[in-house]
Image: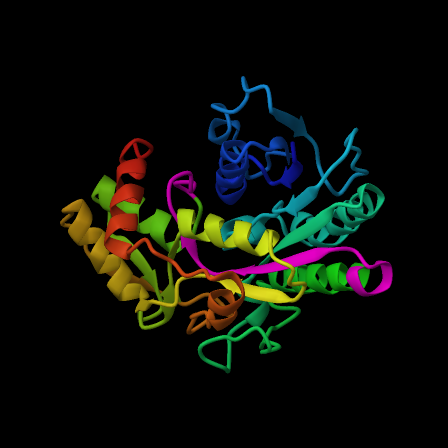
Amino acid sequence: MKRILITGAAGFLGSHLCDKYISEGYDVIGMDNLITGSLDNIAHLMPLEHFTFYHHDVTKFVHVPGKLDYILHFASPASPIDYLKMPIQTLKVGSLGTHNLLGLAKMKKARFMIASTSEVYGDPLVHPQTEDYWGNVNPIGPRGVYDEAKRFQEAMTMAYHTYHGLEIRIVRIFNTYGPRMRVNDGRALPAFFSQALRGEDITVFGDGSQTRSFCYVADLVDGINKLLLSDYNLPVNIGNPTEITINQAAEEVLHLVGSNSKIIHMALPKDDPKVRKPDITKAKELLNWKPVVGREEGFKITFDYFKTKVK
């Protein structure tokens, strides 16, 4: 039986990954300090024989007894509302946390994957974004704590690969959505769904012409798994290349919810990316992966989830 450690296990992506590897017959160890994660996301796994949960902060020394085949480092505040509130923790989990887990992977001879992000591209000057684009990031801007934590994380992980010969995987995750996103996440879709369900005005930052490419979580998890099991050590974009404006996303949510809410516009936050679209050529060619869940289907499932959470 393969044994896998997943950090950030009680978060949105981490909990879906725990589900995936339990269903694949792995022995799964979930780790989370619960500053943004919720035990509700993994409560259904707690009674299972092959799931173990550690309430632990990975910026402190990490010890896991026994063998490990894989380590997936998905711990980090991931939405602007979180990393602007917790800038130091965000930098520490990307640096100290990554270093601690790389050391554990080296000791256990485990394959190591990091959850990097499209934010390494910053406010991009290249569109769509390919893995060989180095990005346009303001290191001292408000978003820099997240962007640079992830860029450092990639550099540290690659250093362990080149210096120690560690097996690594680097997944650059683009905008993802689905059940278990937090209502107060601060990202566009949770905000739109919760505001529409409450009958509140939907707040769009800027004029709404900025674009995003939304990938349903099941597609993302499939891409992550295929990358983990591949033999490729360089970064790979995983996301949905179907690009829409934020205004269009808001209008689709309003239509789905059947809400009479109005769309209102607020000032665009500093360094907010104007465009975001992954070039997934590598994922298609190397992993035989592409997203299969359309936005209409994914939005409907997500809407059904938020209906149970919004009061």
x%, y% of residue 183? Answer: 39, 40
Q: In this figure, which colouring scheme has been used for the structure?
A: rainbow
Side (left or right) of 135 relative to 88: left
The mark tally for this picture is: 0
> Would residue 171 be counted in the magenta stretch?
yes
Asked whether 161 or 305 is in front, the reply is: 161
Instruction: Evaluate whether residue 272 shows in this view.
Output: no
The quarter of the image holding the C terminus is: top left
Q: Please report the bounds of the magenta region as a residue range.
A: 161-184
Identify the residue at image location x=77%, y=34%: 67
The quarter of the image holding the N terminus is: top right
Instruction: Evaluate whether residue 191 shows in this view.
Output: yes
> Would residue 243 be counted in the magenta stretch?
no
Asked whether 139 or 237 is in front, the reply is: 237
Identify the residue at image location x=60%, y=24%: 50
274 shown above or below 227 = below
Asked whether 53 or 203 is in front, the reply is: 53
User: Which residue in the rendered view is the most extreme toward the bottom?
Assistant: 125
x%, y% of residue 274? Answer: 42, 74
Identify the residue at image location x=60%, y=73%: 137
x%, y% of residue 194? Answer: 30, 43
Identify the residue at image location x=57%, y=73%: 131
Side (left or right) of 213 relative to 105: left
Asked whether 199 or 74 is in front, the reply is: 74
